[in-house]
Amino acid sequence: MDVNNVKSQMRKGMLEYCILLLLHKQPAYASDIILKLKEAKLIVVEGTLYPLLTRLKNDALLSYEWVESTQGPPRKYYKLTATGEQFLGELEASWCELSNTVEHLKAIQVE
């Protein structure tokens, strides 16, 4: 079994949750999202992020607004919708359950 494949699958599963967490704090431009994910050691490329943002928008979890830029063309800033906020709350509850389960299993002493 390839540990890198498992790690990749784990990251892929967390990516949507992490993006929603970032956008819960404030609207963001796609490049800013990538930068913040890289700072958190979750490496993502534009080719992965843009389709995911589009899917989240199509699922009514995100919206966007065009904002004029002093450094070129207008930028698309993504933000959570009310539905996105509710979905994030559900993901947060699921994450807490999963985290508690893993911590419980790690704490079990084999006899």
Image: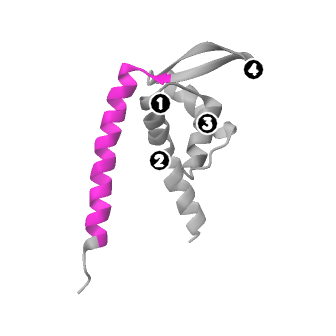
| Residue for badge 1 | 23
Q: Is residue 13 above or below residue 2?
A: above
Q: Are marks 4 and 1 in contact (CB under 8 Å)?
A: no
| Residue for badge 4 | 71
Q: Earlier in the sequence, mark 4 or mark 2?
A: 2
Q: Earlier in the sequence, mark 4 or mark 1?
A: 1
Distance from disc 2 to disc 3, alpha carbons, whole Å, reads: 13 Å
Judged by depth in the image, the label closer to the viewer, 4 or 3, is: 4
Q: Is residue 102 above or below residue 60?
A: below
**Predominant secondary structure in magenta?**
helix
Residues shaded magenta: 79-106
On the image, the x and y values in percent for residue 107 come to 27, 72
What secondary structure is marked by label 1?
Answer: helix
Amino acid tagged 2: Met
Give the residue displayed 31% in from the left and 36% down from the top: 90
Which dot marks residue 111?
Answer: none
Label 1: few (<14), some (14–19) or many (≥20) C-alpha neighbours in 10 Å: many
Q: Is residue 3 above or below residue 22?
A: below
**Residue at the limit of the structure toward the front, as seen here:** 70
Q: How is the image coloured?
A: one colour
| Residue for badge 3 | 49
Judged by depth in the image, the label closer to the viewer, 4 or 2, is: 4
